């Protein structure tokens, strides 16, 4: 039987680039390991996805998806919500469920860093920093693992990447988040011992020994590796300063270059031997992938072997490196003044009790949605700017109200002349619970709706100009519509 492919495979890396990489890593792998790596590189890398626990029942969603789209799937062993799609007749990005944010497409190896955190040792509502967050896959994973009740600051130093990060978090339905755009170096000095956990998925050479569409193998010079290692060490030191004593740091890269992996951890341990320790990976991950004792030139700190080094041929993923650290003691040094902006200048005003009750009762009457319980459980408060209403994290207001942000919280909806309309992203998060104002789109019109067309129909049992939630024949959220004479007009996001 012909094997189905999940997607067209990228062109192989130029032979000289691949040969140089294999020659470089051969002493670390040995003859047998090198042969296994070469064999693995010849096989296509399966796509993988991580389910959104706020929008689907993880115990049922994957079987439903596999049945609907003809997928053959395999669980990612170290991520309870992760699945590799081994076979698929069509790209897994072209589904209603992906469009609705019910799963995120992510390399299986990239699911490892967030799974390394031991959340049982953190406060019930942890304050977490994702220091280099874009494009946002690991940020959404942090939101999942903290139950969207712990505040996640998603930071990225590149202004051009912030908008894409915002879209990912909105599509996921994340509310207890804020997006900032600063150099990661800032946080250690401006917010010392503020965070319960810090994820540093560091900028790296991306030498993962697998050629993919997004990360083709390329030549990497020794000077580039040295420069990256120096930058990574600065960021890791900043992370160590930013986390409170007893807090956790996960350091990860999508490269297998020892200079950027074990070498960076070794340098940190030499600098602060009494302030930080590397932790043994939790047994629940079920993987054995120790870090290197030596790169053949220098011997690393013995605890560096507690890191996880995923070789493609041993893990069945792209190459990856990750380690969890615990801060034992404070670091010397003085704090600096963080960036400041009076919160009033954002134009946001908190809803008073009467406004909140009116809005909440309207959502209950129209859609059967209880926003009051959600706000209380997630520790969120509603604020308004113009006609837009946002759910904003209380912890952000308590700890970071003066910190300028790119995006904050989740847009709940807009006031319109026809009433309050829930936003696309807020309604998508709670679409499974909507009890009224629901329109099931005929299957034959699904693609036309997704292409932006309005749906022509008369005689609907809805009030004129009211808003309806549109879903497909499988009950998957497709978007919002306004009821007009002879049609349901599609509402843009």
Image: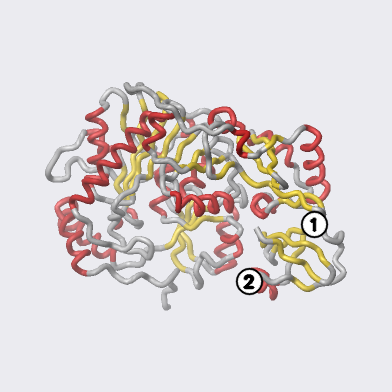
In the rendered view, tell whether residue 289 sits above or below residue 198: below
Estimate the x, y position of residue 249 in percent, counting from the top left: 39, 35
Estimate the x, y position of residue 211 in percent, counting from the top left: 32, 63
Q: Locate the C terminus and report the quarter of the image it occupies.
A: bottom right
Instruction: Return the residue at label 2.
Output: 451
Dot 2 alpha-carbon crowd within 10 angstroms: few under 14, some 14 to 19, many 20 or more: few
Q: Left or right: 362 with respect to 450?
A: right
Instruction: Return the residue at label 1.
Output: 437
Estimate the x, y position of residue 304 in percent, counting from the top left: 25, 37
- Depth check: 186 or 483 in front? 186
- Depth check: 3 or 245 in front? 245
Which label belongs to residue 226?
none
Describe the element under mark 2 as helix, strand or loop.
loop
Question: From mark 1 to mark 2, how far is it between C-alphas?
Answer: 22 Å
- Depth check: 232 or 148 in front? 232
Q: Name which residue lies at 17% across and 45% down.
A: 295
């Amino acid at each position: 039987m012909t094997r189905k492919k999940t997607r067209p495979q990228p062109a192989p890396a130029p032979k000289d680039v691949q040969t140089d990489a294999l020659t470089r890593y051969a002493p670390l792998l040995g003859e047998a390991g090198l042969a296994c790596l070469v064999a693995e590189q010849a096989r296509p890398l399966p796509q993988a996805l991580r389910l959104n626990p706020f929008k689907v029942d993880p115990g049922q969603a994957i079987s439903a998806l596999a049945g609907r789209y003809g997928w053959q799937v395999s669980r990612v062993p170290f991520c309870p919500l992760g699945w590799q799609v081994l076979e698929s007749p069509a790209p897994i990005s072209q589904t209603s469920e992906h469009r609705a944010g019910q799963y995120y497409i992510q390399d299986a190896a990239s699911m490892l860093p967030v799974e390394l955190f031991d959340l049982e040792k953190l406060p019930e509502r942890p304050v977490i920093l994702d220091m280099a967050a874009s494009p946002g896959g690991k940020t959404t994973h942090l939101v999942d693992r903290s139950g969207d009740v712990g505040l996640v600051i998603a930071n990225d130093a590149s202004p051009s990447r912030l908008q894409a990060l915002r879209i990912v978090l909105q599509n996921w339905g994340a509310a207890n988040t804020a997006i900032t755009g600063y150099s990661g170096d800032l946080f250690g000095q401006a917010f010392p011992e503020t965070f319960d956990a810090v994820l540093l998925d560091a900028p790296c050479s991306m030498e993962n020994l697998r050629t993919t569409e997004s990360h083709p193998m390329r030549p990497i010079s020794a000077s580039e590796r040295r420069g990256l290692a120096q930058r990574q060490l600065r960021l890791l030191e900043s992370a160590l300063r930013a986390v409170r004593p007893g807090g956790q740091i996960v350091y990860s890269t999508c490269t297998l270059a020892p200079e950027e992996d074990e070498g960076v951890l070794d340098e940190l341990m030499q600098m602060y031997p009494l302030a930080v320790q590397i932790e043994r990976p939790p047994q629940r991950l079920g993987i054995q992938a120790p870090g290197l004792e030596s790169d053949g030139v220098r011997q690393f700190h013995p605890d560096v072997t507690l890191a996880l080094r995923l070789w493609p041929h041993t893990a069945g993923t792209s190459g990856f490196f990750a380690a969890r650290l615990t801060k034992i003691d404070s670091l010397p040094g003085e704090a600096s003044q963080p960036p400041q902006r009076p919160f009033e200048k954002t134009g946001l005003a908190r809803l008073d009790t009467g406004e909140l009750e009116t809005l909440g009762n309207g959502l209950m009457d129209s859609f059967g949605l209880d926003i009051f319980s959600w706000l209380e459980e997630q520790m969120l408060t509603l604020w308004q700017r113009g006609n837009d209403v946002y759910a904003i994290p209380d912890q952000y207001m308590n700890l970071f109200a003066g910190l300028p942000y790119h995006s904050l919280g989740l847009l709940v909806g807009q006031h319109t002349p026809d009433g309050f309309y829930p936003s696309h992203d807020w309604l998508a998060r709670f679409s499974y619970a909507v009890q009224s104002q629901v329109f099931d789109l005929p299957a034959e019109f699904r693609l036309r709706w997704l292409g932006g067309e309005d749906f022509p129909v008369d005689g609907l049992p809805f009030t004129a100009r009211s808003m309806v939630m549109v879903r497909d024949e499988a009950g998957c959220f497709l978007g919002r519509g306004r009821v007009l004479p002879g049609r349901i007009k599609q509402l843009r996001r």
